[in-house]
Amino acid sequence: MMYKELSNKSEKDLRDLLAEKQQEEHILRAKAGERQLKNVRAIRSARLAVAQIKTALQAKKIKVA
């Protein structure tokens, strides 16, 4: 998901999406630890998505204040 798309979402949507992506990252890490994950680069993309969502949330907080 692109950052521009994230900046248009509401704060509640961003929080829901953040929880979803963090859960996905947790599952990917567990699979990698068990050697069941073939595409380990998926962990990096999940971590990037979490960082982008957190940045969008922080920007909304700053904009409101």
Image: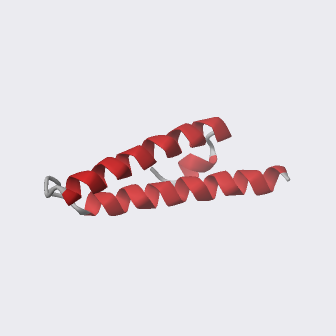
Q: Is residue 54 left or right of residue 25?
A: right
Q: Is residue 40 left or right of residue 14?
A: left
Would residue 10 be seen by someone viewing this image from the given angle? Answer: no
> Is 7 above or below relative to 55?
above
Q: Is residue 29 left or right of residue 4?
A: left
Q: Is residue 18 left or right of residue 46?
A: right
Residue shown at 36% from the left, 52% from the top: 25
Relative depth, front residue between 7 and 17 = 17
Residue shown at 66% from the left, 41% from the top: 11
> Is 50 above or below relative to 41?
above
Horizontal and vertical percent position of residue 55: 61, 59
Horizontal and vertical percent position of residue 1: 45, 50
Would residue 47 be seen by someone viewing this image from the given angle? Answer: yes
Relative depth, front residue between 40 and 64 = 40
Label tally: 0
Horizontal and vertical percent position of residue 14: 58, 42
Q: How is the image coloured?
A: secondary structure
Horizontal and vertical percent position of residue 38: 14, 57
Relative depth, front residue between 27 and 57 = 27
Residue shown at 55% from the left, 52% from the top: 53
> Is 55 above or below relative to 5?
below
State the image quarter where residue 8 is shown: top right
